[in-house]
Image (cartoon, rainbow, N blue to C red):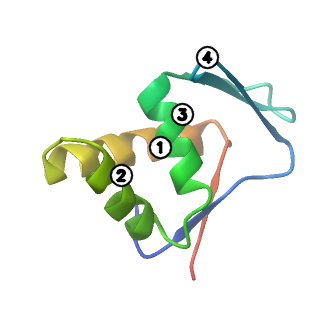
Amino acid sequence: MVNFTCRVTVPETVLFRELDGESVLLNLDTESYLGLNEVGTRMWAVLTTSPTIQAAYDELQTEYDVAPDVLRQDMENLLDQMLEHGLVQIVEV
């Protein structure tokens, strides 16, 4: 379970490329990658620029018409996948 008081950072070895709203993340060290649709790409953008995961959640809650628990679960799932592939790091603030 991800702690929403933490912050998401991106390792220097991770590349992000966006094309027509979709994107690909690639870890150059492990060659692991993950493709994101438009919603995943927006989540990535907000998560990697917000001071905390909670702040990202709050911002996304205002942008999408989705139940709070569904958004929270979707964010946790995406973060778990990105952590598994070494595409992000979670740091305490």
Q: Which mark is residue 41?
A: 3
Image quadrant for the C terminus? bottom right
Judged left or right of residue 18, residue 75 is left
Seen at 58% across and 46% down, the residue is 45
Q: CA distance from mark 4 to mark 1?
A: 15 Å
SS for tag 4?
loop
Image position of 83 with respect to 49: above or below: above
Comparing 64 with 81, the one in front is 64
| Residue furthest to the top | 20
Residue at the spot of label 2? 60
Residue at the spot of label 4? 20
Q: Residues within 10 Å of mark 2 (few under 14, many from 20)?
A: many
Tell me the kind of residue under disc 2: Leu
Residue at the spot of label 1? 43
Q: CA distance from mark 2 to mark 1?
A: 7 Å
Say which label, 4 or 1, has the lower sequence index.
4
Residue 7 at x, y percent in the picture = 56, 68
Tell me the kind of residue under disc 1: Met
Q: Residues within 10 Å of mark 1 (few under 14, many from 20)?
A: many
Q: Residues within 10 Å of mark 3 (few under 14, many from 20)?
A: many
Whether residue 68 can be seen here: yes
Q: Residues within 10 Å of mark 4 (few under 14, many from 20)?
A: few
Residue 61 at x, y percent in the picture = 27, 54
Residue 22 at x, y percent in the picture = 57, 21
